[in-house]
Image: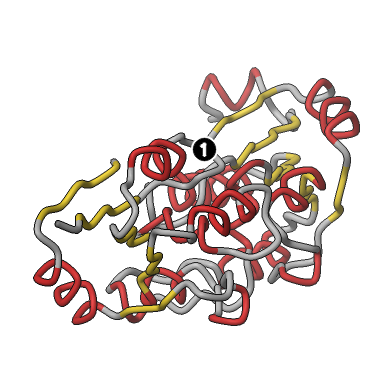
Amino acid sequence: MAMLHTVNKSPFERVSLDSCISMAKKGSSVLLIEDGVYGALKGTKVADKVSKAMDGITFYVLGPDLAARGMTEERIISGIKVVDYAGFVDLTTKHENFQAWL
Amino acid sequence: MAEPWEEENEGKVKKFMFINRKAPYGTIYALESLEVVLITAAFDQDVSLVFTDDGVFQIKKGQTTAGIGMKNFSPTYRALEGYDIEKLYVDKESLDARGLTAEDLIVDVEVMSRAQLADLMNEQDVVMSF
C-alpha cells in the first residue's frame, strides 16, 4: 500500500521536508508543491538529503509552482518528475492514502 | 498652514531598512513588503532593502505565474529605481545555501556578508521585517 505525501513549505524555513523524508516508507511518493518546490532544486544545502531519499521514494514536483518561482526543469535534481495539476490528480488516485506535511 | 506633524518633522529624512526573509507566493509577506516600500519611498525617505533567507527567492529571474493564477509582482522590483530606491542588498550566505548567484536575480544588487549586513542594520533609524 503506497502513500502519497505532499510538502508545501520551504525546506530552508521549516522541517516539513525532513519530517516527511524520515517517515515516508519505501515505495511511497512525495510531491513537492507551493514553497515546497524549493526542495527539488540542485545545488542547495538540502539537495543531498533529497537525492539520498530518492533511493526508495519517488519524488515529484508541481510544474506551475516551479514556474511561478522562476525555476526551470534544468535546475531540478535529476530523477524528480515534474507534473502538472492533472498529474497531481492522477497521483492522488493512484495512491491508497495521503499525508500533507503542512 | 502646515499640519502639526509637518512642522515638527519638516525635512526630516529617516533611514528605513526593509528586511525580506520569505519566499514569494507561498505567503503574502513579499507582496506586502513591496507595498510598504513604495509608500515609504513616496515620503522621500532613505530606503534600503535587504533580501536574506528565503527572501532571496523574491528576486529570482523568470517568474511565470500564469499557471498558479496569481499576479507576478517581480517586475516591480525592477521599477524601484524609478522611485529612487537603489540600495538593494542580498545576503551571500542565503544565495549559496539555495544554489543561487547574483546572475539569477532580476535586479542589480550588492551581495554582502552577514557581518556587513549587520553593520548596515545597526545604522538604521527604522527596521521593518517581512
Element under disc 1: loop
Image quarter of residue B91: top right
Picture quarter with the N terminus of chain A? bottom left
Task: Examine the rendered structure and indicate whether residue A23 appears above or below residue A41.
Answer: above
Query: Who's the residue at 67% across and 60% down the image?
Result: B83
The image quadrant that residue A35 belongs to is: bottom left
Q: Residue at (52%, 51%) from the top-left corner?
A: B34
Q: Is residue A17 or residue B105 the one in the foreground?
A: A17
User: What chain does badge 1 belong to?
Assistant: A
Residue at image x 59%, y 57%? B57
| Horizontal side, residue A72 vs residue B80: left or right | left
Q: Amino acid at mark 1?
A: Glu
Task: Pinpoint residue A63: horizontal percent, then vertical percent.
Answer: 39, 77
B20, above or below A8, in the image: above
- Tell me if B69 is positioned left or right of A44 in this view: left
Mark 1 crowd level (few <14, some 14–19, many ≥20, 10 Å Cα): few
The residue to which callout 1 is attached is A13
On-image quarter of the C terminus of chain A: top left
At which x and y percent is residue B90? Answer: 77, 49
